[in-house]
Image: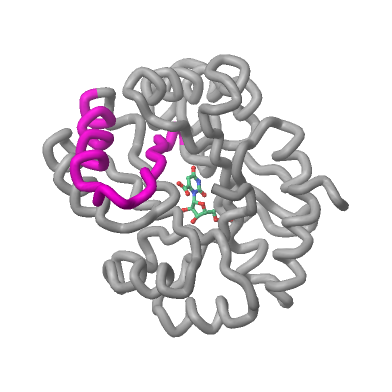
Amino acid sequence: MNQKPFIALDFPTWEDTSSFLELFDESLNVKVGMELYLQNGPSIIEKLLKDNHRIFLDLKLHDIPNTVYGAMKGLAQYDLELLNVHAAGGTAMMEKALEGLHTGRPANQNPTKLIAVTQLTSTSEKQMRDEQLIARSINDSVLHYASLAKQSGLDGVVCSPHEAMLIREHYGEDFLRVTPGIRLSDDDKGDQQRITTPEKAREMGSSLIVVGRSITKAENPQLAYEQVVKEWEGLK
Ligand SMILES: O=C(O)c1cc(=O)[nH]c(=O)n1[C@@H]1O[C@H](COP(=O)(O)O)[C@@H](O)[C@H]1O
């Protein structure tokens, strides 16, 4: 997998998605999330693959182990870079997710990496304490979820850049730290809580970054993407 930023294609339709993609004359790392997938179905994946884009399918599965197993087994037919589940689903669920992914993968296809969402980047420590009743720091909670993901055999986690270094220190460089919550410095934080810039994310130990609105809602998305890439690659 290359290390280019994943652009979050949070659009409602294929028309919106393809007019955005037409601004770029290269194949991209893209993230398909629930907005696009749930309204357009698996055909979205086929269209993006046909155009040689590399896909992180972000469905954040969180259900009983047997249900997640079946869903993963079905999704395994697609040649995806990354898929995710919620670590809060537990080790039994994550193990079955992995098993489904292995069972469903066509023999000639590269393995898809499976990662677990820890604490959403839109969650603050206060909210975690008040609403999830976790009386610990965000770092403790993210690290704990990362340990469950590691124990279950997953390839890494989704976390904010703020926890990336801690996870790298505990589980090594190969255990992925995929980090959304990325903003170009003058952009709106919006609904995100734990954010930083692409440059800082690199310094803070992210392995991959996911960027949505800083690119998709920019006046000039191409320029914004170039800026993100430059900062991320340390060429700024
Ligand atoms: O799993 C994810 O991709 C994800 C996890 C998380 O903790 N926070 C998070 O923002 N995301 C996704 O990353 C993208 C971030 O979008 P922007 O805030 O617009 O850059 C969205 O598509 C979110 O669904």
Q: Residue at x 19, y 41 (%)?
A: 103
Q: Residue furthest right?
A: 236
Image coords of residue 201 (percent x, y): 70, 39
Residue 217 figure quarter:
bottom right
Q: Residue at x 63, y 47 (%)?
A: 3
Q: Residue at x 76, y 71 (%)?
A: 223
Image coords of residue 206 (percent x, y): 64, 36
Image coords of residue 22 (percent x, y): 58, 82
Along the viewing direction, whichever of 75 and 122 lies nearer the viewer: 75
Along the viewing direction, whichever of 142 and 225 lies nearer the viewer: 225
Colour option used: one colour
Image coords of residue 203 (percent x, y): 76, 34
Q: How many marks?
A: 0
Q: Residue furthest front?
A: 108
Above or below for 11 versus 214: below
Q: Is residue 220 magenta?
A: no
Report the side of 82 relative to 202 (left or right).
left
The region drawn magenta spans: 92-119
Report the side of 192 relative to 158 (left or right).
right
Q: Is residue 102 magenta?
A: yes
Q: Residue at x 28, y 67 (%)?
A: 42
Report the side of 117 relative to 46 (left or right).
right
Above or below for 175 versus 185: above
